[in-house]
């Protein structure tokens, strides 16, 4: 069954602790993304990666870090430097199409809700 | 960078009526405009998209229109049904597999 799996679904952490959110896909997609969703704020891009061992900052990268050691995996670490980490985090993937002009369809995971106490 | 504005933020319609959600974008280089639907507690899913070489696209009760000159695009849902109730996001991206920039979303409520 192909798709994107995020874990954990819910996560509680104390202020000052780092936390890592997992994202795994078996769609053979080259590109992966992390978005943050807050009420009334839409989906804001944190980081993205179009190829293994390479990634770029999005609009709100401060306080976050990522790695892309495998094509299937794109974990997100929320560090203690993130001032307001309580949010819903969505991972997505898409195919990179070298001869087509646009991003194409994003496939999203079910999300991880992080609450910092 | 690209900025996408979406209106209204909330919309209530009677079942069977039409709903229209509008978005504007800032970067004239953007060429891909998808719409995503997020039902309560679920992941966003693509419902329709349009590319800059097309002015309108329809899929059953859903249609999207694009005005490149004015830099705005709209989602039209006809004969709305309760299952259309969700948050809808518009987005835009530029050529070259660049990431999507999303609007802030519209919460649509269809009242039976």
Image (tube, rainbow, N blue to C red):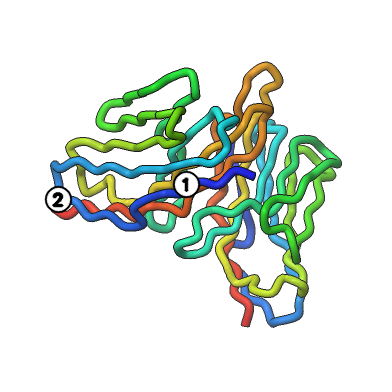
Displayed quadrant of residue B80? top left
**Viewed as shown, does residue A99 lie left or right of B8?**
right
Q: Residue at x 48, y 18 (%)?
A: B53
Asked if residue A1 can be seen in this view, the reply is: no
Subunit of mark 1?
A: B
Q: Residues within 10 Å of mark 2 (few under 14, many from 20)?
A: some
Q: Nearer the viewer, mark 1 or mark 2?
A: 2
Q: Residue at x 73, y 40 (%)?
A: A72
Q: Quadrant of the N terminus of chain B?
A: top right
Q: Secondary structure at mark 1?
A: loop
Residue A117 higher or lower than A44, as above or below: below
- 1 or 2: tag closer to the N-terminus: 2
* Number of numbered discs overlaid on the protein picture: 2
View extreme (front): residue: B69
Question: With A67 as the anchor, is A25 left or right in this view?
Answer: left
Q: Which residue is mark 1?
A: B44
Residue B105, position in %: x, y? Answer: 42, 52
Residue B93 location (% of width, % of height): 58, 35
Instruction: Please tell me which residue is depicted at 54% across the width and 41% down the height of the picture.
Output: B26
Q: Nearer the viewer, residue B94 or A111?
A: B94
Q: Is residue A52 visible?
A: yes
State whether residue A63 is above or below residue A110: below
Q: CA distance from mark 1 to mark 2?
A: 24 Å
- Give how far across and how far down residue A55 sits, in percent: 79, 44
| Residue B4 locus on image (x, y percent) | 51, 46
Q: Which residue is mark 2?
A: B14
Residue A84 as seen in the image, left or right of residue A18: left
Badge 2 marks a residue whose secondary structure is: strand
């Amino acid at each position: 069954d192909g798709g994107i799996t995020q874990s954990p679904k819910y996560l509680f952490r104390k202020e000052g602790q780092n936390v890592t959110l997992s994202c795994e896909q078996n769609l053979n997609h080259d590109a992966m993304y992390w978005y943050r969703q807050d009420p009334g704020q839409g989906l804001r891009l944190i980081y993205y990666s179009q190829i293994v061992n390479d990634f770029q900052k999005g609009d709100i990268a401060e306080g976050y870090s990522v790695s892309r050691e495998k094509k299937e995996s794109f974990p997100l670490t929320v560090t203690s430097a993130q001032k307001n980490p309580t949010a819903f985090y969505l991972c997505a993937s898409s195919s990179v199409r070298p001869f087509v002009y646009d991003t194409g369809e994003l496939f999203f995971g079910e999300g991880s809700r992080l609450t910092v106490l | 960078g690209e900025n996408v504005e979406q209106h209204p933020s909330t919309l209530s319609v009677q079942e069977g009526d039409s709903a229209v959600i509008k978005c504007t974008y800032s970067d004239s280089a953007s060429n891909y405009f998808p719409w995503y639907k997020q039902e309560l507690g679920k992941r966003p899913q693509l419902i329709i998209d349009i590319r800059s070489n097309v002015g309108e696209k329809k899929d059953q009760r859903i249609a999207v229109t694009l005005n490149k000159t004015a830099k705005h695009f709209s989602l039209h849902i006809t004969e709305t049904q309760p299952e259309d109730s969700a948050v809808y996001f518009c987005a835009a991206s530029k050529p070259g597999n660049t990431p999507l920039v999303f609007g802030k979303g519209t919460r649509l409520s269809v009242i039976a």
